[in-house]
Amino acid sequence: MTEITSRQDGGPTEAEAHAEPATTSHREDPLVQIELQGCPDAVPRMMVARSKLADEKLTLPFGNGYDHFAFDRYITRNGQLVPIYTWVDRTRIAE
């Protein structure tokens, strides 16, 4: 599961620490636009680190929980492939 968060101390998350080194094209364009569908509270378009798209699932923090998305398909917008992720579930942070 991929998590789109950073540690509060500014260090890498566990996933970032274990990620493979980026290629030259990743360093030139570390963020990519994605579209989210089906989530009532999500922003429909957002930028995420390209490395977060290696898995077909995204977990995005929202309020006191996480929204979970699964890769659906690509669309072409302005000559660029844009990945579409569909909302699957929401989980709450246990306290």
Image (cartoon, grey):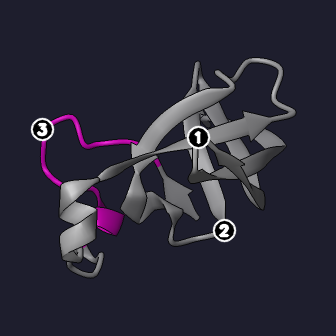
- Nearest to N terminus: mark 1 or mark 2: 2
Q: How much space separates mark 3 and mark 1, taking CA atoms?
A: 37 Å
Q: Position of residue 26 (x, y in %)?
A: 27, 65
Residue, disc 1? 78
What's the magenta region?
Answer: 4-17
Above or below — where is 12 with respect to 63? below
Q: Nearer the viewer, residue 95 or 54?
A: 54
- Nearest to N terminus: mark 3 or mark 1: 3
Residue drawn at point x = 87 percent, y = 33 percent:
38
The answer to whether residue 89 is left or right of residue 13 is right
The answer to whether residue 56 is left or right of residue 8 is right
Q: Residues within 10 Å of mark 3 (few under 14, many from 20)?
A: few
Give the structural element (helix, strand or loop) at label 2.
loop
Above or below — where is 92 with respect to 84? above
Q: How much space separates mark 2 and mark 3, taking CA atoms?
A: 28 Å
Q: How many numbered circles does the render carry? A: 3
Instruction: Using the image, tell me which numbered label, if any, was put on residue 9.
Output: 3
Which quadrant: the C terminus?
top right
Q: Quadrant of residue 81?
A: bottom right
